[in-house]
Amino acid sequence: MKRIFTRALLVCLLVALLSGAAWAEPVTVKLANKTDAKIFVALAQVSEGGEDSGDRVRGWFAVNPGKTRTVKFGNYSPVMSYFYYATSKGGKRIWAGKGDDGSTFQIHPTNAFNSHPDKKISGGKKVRFKHLSVSSEGKARVTFTAK
C-alpha cells in the first residue's frame, strides 16, 4: 500500500512540474510589418490575480517594412494579460488601445525601456496599449497595416 501511495505521489508531482514548465516558457510574439515604414513596438504583461512579480512593460522592438520579427517576451501564464503599443518611425502611425480595449502604461517616446508597469519612467509618458490575444501555448501574432 505504501508503494502505491508513493508512486501516485510521484505521478502527481511529475504532472504538476510538467504543467508548471509550460507556464515558465516565454511568450512568443510574431510582429508582422505590412507597412512601408519602420515600426517600433512595446509589449506589456500584467497579472490579473494580484501577484505582480512578473508584471513588466518593455520597448522598443524595431520591425522593418515588409518584415516579420519574432520576439520572446516575459513568461506565459494563464493569469496574465498581454498588451502592445506601436508607432511608426516619426510617429505618423500609431497602433494603440481605444476605450475598453487595453490598458494604460508608461513608455519612453525615444529610448528603450524595461520596467514594472506601476513605475514611472523618467522622461516617459502614459499611452493606451491594445490587448494582445495570446494562445494557451504562449503564442501571439500582430500584423501592422497602414490605416
Image: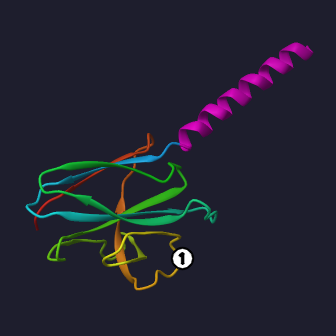
Query: At which x and y percent is residue 68?
Result: 21, 48
Looking at the magenta stretch, what is its main secondary structure? helix
Q: Which residues are magenta?
A: 1-24
Residue 87 sits in which quadrant?
A: bottom left
Left or right: 106 in relation to 51: left
- Residue 50 lies, in percent from the top left, at 63, 66
Between 118 and 13, the one lying in front of the other is: 118
Q: Which residue is mark 1?
A: 118
Residue for point 50% across, 65% down: 56
Residue at image point 66% right, 34% down: 17
6 versus 91 height, above or below: above
Viewer-proximal residue among 100 and 121: 121
The residue at the point 10 percent across, 64 percent down is: 146
Q: Position of residue 10 (x, y in %)?
A: 76, 23
Residue at coordinates 16% horizontally, 63% vertically from top-left? 38
- Asked if residue 94 is positioned above or below residue 142 in the image, the reply reads below
Q: Amino acid at mark 1?
A: Asp
